[in-house]
Image (tube, helix red, strand yellow):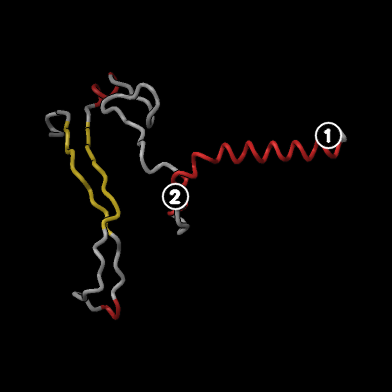
Amino acid sequence: MAKDLDAVTVGPTDLKFKALSQESDGEEGKGDQQDDDLGSVSLSLYVLTDIEASNSAVGIGRNEPNENPILLTPTEGRGWGAYLETFGFPSFDFGLWKKFIPLFVAMFMFLAGMVAMRQVGLL
C-alpha cells in the first residue's frame, strides 16, 4: 500500500482493557485472578497520502474544523462523582435531595441576612 501511495483505513475495532491481576508466588492458573473489564476504546486508523492530508486540514482535538471523523464530546462519566472515584472516594447520590439544595441555600441566605440586619439594628 505504501508503494501504491493509497490511503489506508483500518478499523473500527474495539480495544478492551482488563485489570492486571497480582499473582501470588508466581503461580499461574489460580482462581484469584480477576478478569475485570475496565473499559474499551473504539479505534479507527486513517493513513492519508501527503497530498490528501494537505488538502483536508482539520483542527487539533475537537477544534474546528472538526471533521473526518467528527469527534463528539462524551455526555456520560464527566461528573464530579466519576472524577472523585478515580482517587478512591465514593460518589454520593443524593437522589431527590438534589432538588432541594437551592431551597436550602436560599433559606440559609435569608437567615444570614436576618442576623446581619439584627446586628446592624434594622430589626
Give the total of numbered labels.
2
Farthest residue, direction right: 121
Residue 51 place in picture, x, y as percent: 24, 22
User: Image height check: is 38 above or below 22?
Assistant: above
Q: Residue furthest front?
A: 123
Q: Residues within 10 Å of mark 1 (few under 14, many from 20)?
A: few
- Report x, y in % for residue 120: 86, 36
Residue shown at the point (31%, 71%) measured from the top left: 22
Q: CA distance from mark 2 to mark 1?
A: 40 Å
Q: Residue extending furthest top?
A: 55
Secondary element type, mark 1 = loop
Q: Disc 2 vs disc 1: which is toward the camera?
A: 1
Q: What residue is shown at x 55% (from left), y 41% (from top)?
A: 101
Q: Position of residue 64 (x, y in %)?
A: 38, 22
Q: Please give the label number shown on residue 123.
A: 1
Q: Amino acid at mark 1?
A: Leu
Q: Which numbered circle lies on residue 60?
A: none
When asked about the image quadrant of residue 12, the answer is: top left
Amino acid type at mark 2 = Asp
Q: Quadrant of the N terminus?
A: top left
Which mark sits nearer the N-terminus, 2 or 1?
2
Q: Quadrant of residue 7?
A: top left
| Mark 2, other Cα within 10 Å: few <14 / some 14–19 / many ≥20 | few
In the picture, the disc for residue 93 is 2
Name the residue nearer the viewer: 33 or 23: 33
Residue located at (44% from left, 49% from top): 93
Whether residue 110 sits left or right of residue 50 in the image: it is: right
Q: Is residue 59 above or below residue 76?
A: above
Quadrant of the image containing the C terminus = top right
